[in-house]
Image: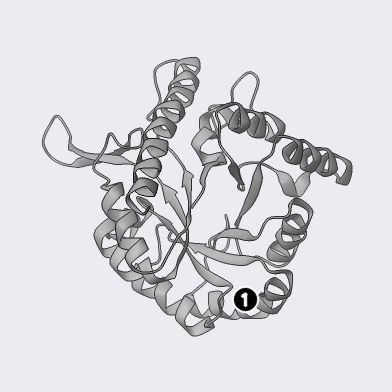
Amino acid sequence: MKLGLGSYALAWNIGVPGYLPEKPLDAFGFVEFAAQHGFELVQMSDNLPLKSMSGAELERLEAHTRNLGLKVELGARGLQSGNLGRYLELCGRFGATLLRVVVDGPDHHPSSEEVVQTLREALPFFENAGVTLAVENHDRFPAQALAGIVTVLDSPFVGICLDTVNSFGALEGPGVVIETLGPFVENLHVKDFVIQRVDYNMGFTITGTPAGQGLLDLPELLSSLTARGRNPNLILELWPTPEPELEATLEKERFWIEESAAYLRTLLAARREETR
């Protein structure tokens, strides 16, 4: 169980549509940030444009990441033609043994049956390469549907990337998601949150917090996964609300990473002591 930094933990610094920093953080800056802050693993996802980088750029990035002593996981978005194959090539280049997959693309929202068909066609190539496909719970599909997809495919190289917040979009909280998807978890997105009633009372907001400062009972979640025989890497992601000035938002995001990492390292160290 390693602690990793996901590229979506630095989404504002990398650039959100309509909120582009003067100097956006690129993939090189991302891995340097991760190493400087003591992470041993990075998950470079679709908000870093690895697919569009040249072979020479990718070679430099792989060498730089390796020299920093970082392990790599990758994240893909969309099951459109050729996308999984391209990311499998990238996994081979970076020595990544896990690919997180969000099944929906910008213009493609496959049914459960289409997801099964596409993953089944790709699966032999991933099995041969020793790369696990970790399907993320991401808004649209309820946990039971995702569990069904993994069960039908019935491969040790297909599992779940469990995000602790995303399934609110499918009207499911963490308790339901963990209970249903826990046996299949290969990767864990740690994303803490609070739910607050709006000041005019008619509604609620779900917003992010640094890890350990919200409603997520991470110690219980990890114990639950361990009891199910799961030992996933923990990938930190964040949902910071924007400040009035973009630069303040960027600073807030970086500070939240520092706070979250300190909490998670303390938690993991305590768990290691308990198991001695």
Three-letter code, disc 1: Thr
The residue most toward the left is 201
Label 1 neighbourhood size at 10 Å, few (<14), some (14-19), many (20+)? some
Residue for point 31% across, 55% down: 221
Work out whether 22 lies above or below 253. Answer: above
Is residue 247 toward the left or the right of residue 196 in the image?
A: right
Count how many numbered circles sit on residues in the image: 1
Residue for point 72% across, 39% down: 65
Front residue (pair 217, 153): 217
Residue for point 43% across, 61% down: 137
Residue for point 66% across, 29% down: 32
Q: Position of residue 214 (x, y in %)?
A: 26, 38
Q: Position of residue 52 (x, y in %)?
A: 77, 46
Q: Secondary structure at mark 1?
A: helix
Is residue 20 toward the left or the right of residue 69 in the image?
A: left
Reading the image, the residue beneath label 1 is 118
Q: Which of the 4 image quadrants contains residue 155? A: bottom right
Is residue 57 toward the left or the right of residue 214 in the image?
A: right
Front residue (pair 224, 209): 224
Front residue (pair 32, 273): 273
Work out whether 64 lies above or below 117. Answer: above
